[in-house]
Image (cartoon, rainbow, N blue to C red):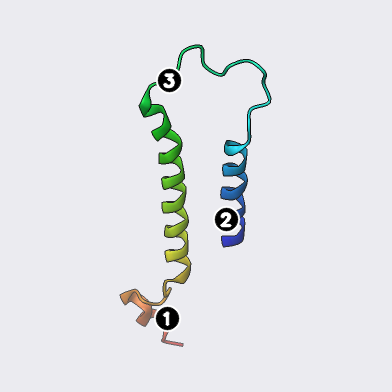
Amino acid sequence: MLLAAFGIVLVADAFFLMPQPNIGPMFVEPPGSWVGLIPAAGFVVQALGLAWMIRIYRSDPEAHPSHWRFDRL
């Protein structure tokens, strides 16, 4: 599962970083300085999501206090 998540992130980031196939300019006037923060925020959110998935993957599923219910067999 983690390999699939890493693969999706790598493919999405590669598509974002690839040059555009059009010939004309993307913007008629230069965008504001805050526009560069939008992709940076996307990369940060992806990194946080992957870190959260790794934390869930490495956690102990029996660490919760209700594991005593499953010991009575």
Q: Earlier in the sequence, mark 3 or mark 1?
A: 3
In the rendered image, residue 61, in percent from the top left (x then y), is placed at: 43, 73
Q: Quadrant of the N terminus?
A: bottom right
Q: Badge 2 is on which residue?
A: 6
For the point 43% across and 20% down, the residue is 31
Describe the element under mark 2 as helix, strand or loop: helix
Q: Badge 3 is on which residue?
A: 31
Q: Earlier in the sequence, mark 1 or mark 2?
A: 2
Describe the element under mark 3 as helix, strand or loop: loop
In the rendered image, residue 35, in percent from the top left (x then y), is placed at: 41, 27
Q: Earlier in the sequence, mark 3 or mark 2?
A: 2
Describe the element under mark 1 as helix, strand or loop: helix
Question: How crowded is the residue under tag 2: few (<14 C-alpha within 10 Å), some, or many (20+)?
Answer: some
Q: Amino acid at mark 1?
A: Phe
Q: Badge 1 is on which residue?
A: 70
Q: Is residue 1 visible?
A: no
Question: How crowded is the residue under tag 1: few (<14 C-alpha within 10 Å), some, or many (20+)?
Answer: few
Q: CA distance from mark 1 to mark 2?
A: 34 Å
In the displayed structure, does residue 35 sit left or right of residue 3? left
Residue 28's place in the image compared with 65, above or below, is: above
Residue 53's place in the image compared with 19, above or below, is: below
For the point 34% across and 75% down, the residue is 66
Residue 33 sits in quarter:
top left
Q: CA distance from mark 3 to mark 1?
A: 59 Å
